[in-house]
Amino acid sequence: MAKRPLLAYLKTVYRSTEKADFQGWSARPGAADACGLSAASDPAVCVAYRCQNDAQRSLLAIDDDVVRLSGYRADELLAGPIGWTSLIHADDRAQVRRTLQDAAAAERAFAVTYRLVRRDGGTQPVREQGQGVRDAAGRLLGYSGFIAGADAAAPEYRRVAQQGSRALPDTLPSAKATEESGDQSTDAAEPRRGEPTPHAHRQRLQRLADAMPQLVWTARPDGTVYYYNDRVTEYAGIHQTADGSWRWQPVLHEDDRERTVEAYRQALASGDTYECEHRVRMADGQLRWHLTRAVPMRDAAGNIVEWFGTATDIHDIKLAQQALESADRRKNRFVATMAHELRNPLAPIRHAIDLLMQPDELPPTAATARDIIDRQSRHLARLVDDLLDMSRITSDRLRLQCEPVLLSTLVDQAQEALAEQIAGREQSITVELPAQPVRLNADTARLVQVFVNLLDNASKFSPEGAHISLEAERVGDEVVVRVSDSGIGIDAADLPRLFEMFAQVGEDAGADSGGLGIGLALTRRLVELHGGTIAATSDGAGEGSTLTVRLPALAEEKTSAEPAAAAPWAQGSGAAVGTAADADGKRRILIADDNDDVVQSLAMLLELRGYDVDIAHDGLQALAAVERERPDTVILDIGMPGLDGHAACRRIRQLPGGERLRIIALTGWGEARDRRNSAEAGFDAHLVKPIESAVLLGLLADTGN
């Protein structure tokens, strides 16, 4: 919407407020066009009106465009008994009446938002802004002003209706702006008989600007501010200098001054809208955040003749934003700390399970107990990982490491990760992939996680002995993967919220999801980060379900990509495992961790594989053990007392021969920054507890890494 026509119209409306002779006033036809709001250019409506000061606010004149706003023609409203009050929603009338009474008592302009009841019974949010009209004795005769309405296609007017006076247009004409802008419209002509003088007109506009909660200002084309409303002096303590200008820079916080001035200079040079957030020192010395905006006003030739600006107090909003950001940081830190504290006890549990997996025969009852602990500890570890991943995604901290990978590789790893679970429930799974290999540009670990989550849900929500299928086909530039089951199905009412965070479908039926309601929400975000989509279909409860993933595929090639490395959680007991026998003679390993259960369980596991193991319980002990025992590999926890893992690693690297040692971090901290810190400290690898023994043993056996 053009600024100049709107400002010109506002001046016309408020010029007429000085006239006491109501019956002699006639509505201006086409006022919406004067505002730059015609049916062809903007769906919003701007209507001028004049009414009496009675209970019904009987209309004396109104713009023909009112039919677009209310459904009533202007002649119906003027000729009939309908007053404007009767068109205001009953629940809003008291608010409007109070607003008008307060404005009349203070002899100031008013602005109010309410619902207008249309002829067809529907409601329309509108914003009314006006001024009381008085006779020579000061008696209130009625009101004159304009009403702006909005629909879904006019967001700027919808914002006015929703937010109130702080969402009014950023600029209003000022006294000096009117005088010096060089406006050549009919408003600059000599006033007609009965109209206010230019001086009275300027006073009226100044009073309107002074009534606004914002700081209102105008500036010359070079940026020199020559007008501020009264609120600036009262609120910020800015005073006019001897040359008539206003020096606003000193009231800015010193840390914000340079960037604010630079942003203003750039706007003056480019002619673009100026917008900046900064802290302003108030008259009482208090610093408060403000949003300052200014728009250029141009003449017919397009030259800037002045700037209109406002500064809106956003201090409370800013503090709320900062509080939310601080709470989010604390939440992320809490989640990471919680994950660390959960992973630490999980590590020795996993080590103990691996010890019990040795060839020695266990009594059936003990073997069953071991398998239960194995399954549930894996499940707990995955819940911790899902919770951390969702925290990373919602905080925009998850970064993909994409590379070409075969779809078959991803599916194989997902199957392998869930092989024991599916076999334990006596379920079966069939996989059908395209004959021509399909390649994706993907983060292998994350897409394996997607397919693991889909297959896990299919297994978890299907009865024992059920069948699960995974089918994939290439459709143009996409690959479509469908995971179907014959399980409990999904009620139609639950489908829209299936992928929402913490959603638990089937709650009314007493279904136990066995999770936090994070898995599918995480799956959707991971798919979307890969440029894909996911959807669910089901014929209802008891009819099974199908989850469909669409992902962009790389162009077909005759030669297939090299299989990607297996994701850590996809490497189980079936993976190739190296042992100390793969190396030349026995190899010595030092384990340092302040959790004795972690040290003892891992030491027993490695000794069974033929390694010589030394242990330490803090960084200083680890440093002494390296000098004394000369190990081949050092496994360090990070959060140890005395000397933490990072400092211990740096000290070990400085020892004679320390640069040749393999040093591995084994910790409950697994954020990206934790891995960076480990690399900077000199670690060769960063493993997150609980680690699968196959992964650790494979790394120890890989002397070439």
Image: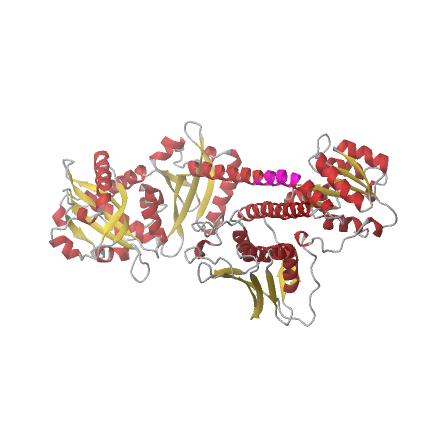
Q: Do we see residue 266 in this rendering?
A: yes
Task: Please state if 22 lies on the left or on the right of 277 as rendered.
Answer: left
Q: Where is residue 412 in the image (x, y as percent from the top left)?
A: 65, 61
- Give how far across and how far down residue 332 sits, in percent: 56, 41
**From the viewer's perspective, is residue 4 above or below residue 555?**
above
On the image, which quarter does residue 110 sit in? top left
User: Residue placed at 34% from the left, 55% from the top?
Assistant: 154
**Residue 163 at x, y = what percent?**
34, 44
Looking at the image, how many numbered discs can be counted on the residues?
0
Q: Is residue 162 above or below residue 536?
A: above
Vertical side of 243 occupied by 664: above or below: below
Identify the image quadrant of the N terminus.
Answer: bottom left
Is residue 241 on the magenta stretch? no
- Does residue 41 appear left or right of residue 622 in this picture? left
Is residue 146 or residue 597 the one in the foreground?
Answer: 597
Q: Quadrant of residue 637?
A: top right
Per the image, is 339 magenta? yes
Please tell me which residue lies in front, 625 or 109. Answer: 625
The answer to whether 175 appears left or right of 312 in the picture is: left
Residue plotted at (15% across, 53% down): 77
Question: Residue 201's spot in the image, x, y percent?
Answer: 25, 42
Tell me the magenta residue range: 335-345
Q: Residue furthest top?
A: 284
Left of 466 or right of it: where is 355? right
Q: Between residue 428 and residue 522, name the one nearer to us.
A: 428
